Each structure stands twice: as structure tokens, then as C-alpha cells.
């Protein structure tokens, strides 16, 4: 059994066959999915919830992505404060910093990131982190991890470094602050040795897998639209690295997910019909 801990299933790329995509995932053994709730940013902030409400095996997040930080206003923060109380919302994210595309000014990204950490702490929700540096630089990592260290770590709520692209030192720093490390399809890319090196070091009980659908389809699907069923390929590659079978990785990361979010007692009831 597998969990896709991060998928943008609300994306327009799935408008023509979303139900079939979800059905294929279930057939492939994906028992749990997390619908990331960023959508296109404010004012619509419940994209993940709308999906999670339709499927008993799906959870949701809320949050403003750094790309859309420029759209954040008090109305958006107030809306998310209310949405955080929804029973299907298990995390706040993805939030963080993106210095690669700079779709929003960096100072605005930092301000919105800090504000969302405040709101997540008040809601007692872990955070899902997006961190992408500019090419050839670790500047976003330093700013992101530094903010987490100063503002978030004292709350003891932890979170997930989603679609991890950093090095082992950066992963270790996050692990020390109570974070899980989630690997996506880029783990399978030929030039992703740094990511594979980090994946070798992360303790087994701190690993997660995801697709980040519809992005970053793993080998052998690279270049196609990604979808939750393909999470098995990330599990397969992680298994090759750790001398485990694909199914063993699936089982371990599924348990990690439920343990981290304290959902273990509900696990069996959330398994979709086959």
C-alpha cells in the first residue's frame, strides 16, 4: 500500500479525467492521498478541501504558495484561519520560499511565510515546505531553514520538506527540527545524485513519498503528466537505494505518514474499496 503525500489534484491538467486518475491510483495500491490546497492562490483557498470532502481516503492542506504571496491579504488570512478548522485539513502548506521563479517579490514571500507560520501554530497544524533556490545558490535554503528555526521550531509541531531537492546537511537540519523528508519523482532523474545521496541518509521512519502531481513525473513516465499512481516508481527507486522492495518502502512510508499526522488509529477505516 502507498500514500501520495502531496498532489495538486485540483489542477486544470486533471479536469478531463480526474475521477479516472484517482481510480487508477486506487487500483495501483495508493490508499491515501493528500490534496494540496494552494490552487491558483487567493481568493480561492479551499481547493484541497473540495476534493477531500468527496473521498474518504483523501486529506487536504491549506496555504498560500510563495508564487502567489503577492496576492495575500488580510481577507485571505482570515479565510484560512476558518478553513484550518475543517476536519479533513491536516497541514498548512505548501508554504515557503521560491527564489528560482520569483513570481512574488522575495520580501513579500518572507512576510507571507512568516504570517502563515503564525497562523499554523495557532491552529496547531504542521507545515508543508516548498523551498527552491535560485540556480547555483543555497540562499533560499538558508532563509527558509533559518525562519523555521527561529519562528517555527519552538512550537514543536514539525512538518514536511516536500519534494526534497537539497543536500544531506539541509535535510539533517530539518530532521533536527522535527520534520519529515518527502521525495518525489525527481529522485529517479539521472542528474539527481544529490537527492539520492540525501535519501540514503534519512532515517527510515522519517521518509515520505509523493508525486507533486501533475509535475515531475518519474522515470519511466518522465515528460508526461504525473499522477498519484506513479508514486510507486519513487518507492521503487527509494527501495533500490535502501535495499528494500518497492512494497516495503510503500508500507514504511504509509505508516510514517499516519504516525506523523497521528492518524494511525483511523488508518484501516480510510482504506478505499478495491
Image (cartoon, rainbow, N blue to C red):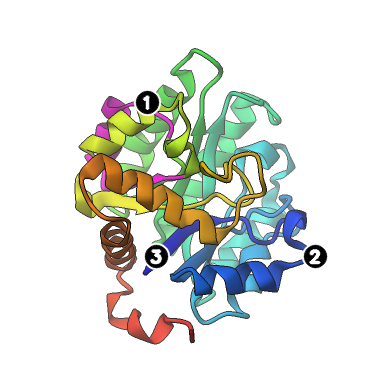
Tag 2's secondary structure?
loop
Residue 261 visible: yes
Percent across and percent down for residue 20 are: 67, 72
Please indicate whether residue 149 sits to the left or right of residue 139 in the image: left
Nearest the viewer among 246 and 151 is 246
Residue range corresponding to the magenta coloring: 165-184
Tag 3's secondary structure?
strand
Question: Which residue does the numbered mark 1 point to in the structure image?
Answer: 193
Quadrant of the rendered image containing residue 268:
bottom left
Do the numbered discs 3 and 1 sit on residues whose CB atoms are within 8 Å?
no
Nearest the viewer among 77 and 27 is 27
Nearest the viewer among 250 and 112 is 250
Question: Which residue does the numbered mark 2 point to in the structure image?
Answer: 16
Tag 1's secondary structure?
helix
Instruction: Name which of mark 2 and mark 1 comes first in the sequence.
Output: 2
Q: How many marks?
A: 3
Indicate the quadrant containing the N terminus: top left, top right, bottom left or bottom right: bottom left
Residue lying furthest front in this view? 220
Q: Residues within 10 Å of mark 2 (few under 14, many from 20)?
A: few
Percent across and percent down for residue 255 are: 28, 66
Give the numbered dot on residue 100: none
Please indicate whether residue 102 sits to the left or right of residue 259 in the image: right
Above or below, comparing residue 190 to residue 30 in the picture: above
Question: Which residue does the numbered mark 3 point to in the structure image?
Answer: 2
Does the segment drawn in magenta span residue 77? Answer: no
Please indicate whether residue 92 sits to the left or right of residue 75 in the image: left
Amino acid at each position: 500500500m502507498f500514500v501520495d503525500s502531496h498532489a495538486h489534484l485540483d489542477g486544470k491538467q486533471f479536469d478531463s479525467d480526474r475521477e479516472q486518475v484517482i481510480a487508477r491510483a486506487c487500483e495501483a495500491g495508493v490508499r491515501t492521498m493528500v490534496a494540496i490546497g494552494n490552487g491558483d492562490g487567493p481568493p480561492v483557498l479551499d481547493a484541497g478541501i473540495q476534493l477531500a470532502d468527496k473521498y474518504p481516503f483523501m486529506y487536504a492542506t491549506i496555504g498560500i504558495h510563495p508564487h502567489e504571496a503577492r496576492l495575500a491579504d488580510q481577507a485571505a488570512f482570515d479565510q484560512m484561519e476558518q478553513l484550518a478548522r475543517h476536519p479533513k485539513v491536516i497541514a498548512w502548506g505548501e508554504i515557503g520560499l521560491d527564489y528560482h521563479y520569483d513570481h512574488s517579490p522575495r520580501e513579500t514571500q518572507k512576510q507571507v511565510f512568516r504570517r502563515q507560520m503564525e497562523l499554523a501554530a495557532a491552529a496547531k497544524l504542521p507545515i508543508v515546505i516548498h523551498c527552491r533556490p535560485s540556480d547555483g545558490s543555497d540562499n533560499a535554503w538558508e532563509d527558509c531553514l533559518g525562519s523555521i528555526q527561529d519562528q517555527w521550531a519552538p512550537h514543536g509541531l514539525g512538518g514536511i520538506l516536500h519534494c526534497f531537492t537539497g543536500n544531506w546537511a539541509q535535510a539533517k537540519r530539518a530532521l533536527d527540527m522535527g520534520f519529515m523528508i518527502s521525495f518525489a519523482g525527481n529522485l529517479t532523474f539521472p542528474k539527481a545524485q544529490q537527492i539520492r545521496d540525501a535519501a540514503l541518509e534519512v532515517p527510515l521512519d522519517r521518509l515520505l513519498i509523493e508525486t507533486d502531481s501533475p509535475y515531475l513525473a518519474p522515470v519511466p513516465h518522465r515528460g508526461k503528466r504525473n499522477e498519484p499512481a506513479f508514486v510507486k516508481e519513487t518507492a521503487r527507486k527509494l527501495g533500490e537505494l535502501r535495499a528494500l522492495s518497492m512494497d516495503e518502502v510503500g508500507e514504511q512510508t504509509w505508516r510514517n505518514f499516519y504516525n506523523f499526522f497521528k492518524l494511525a488509529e483511523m488508518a484501516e477505516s480510510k482504506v478505499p474499496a478495491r
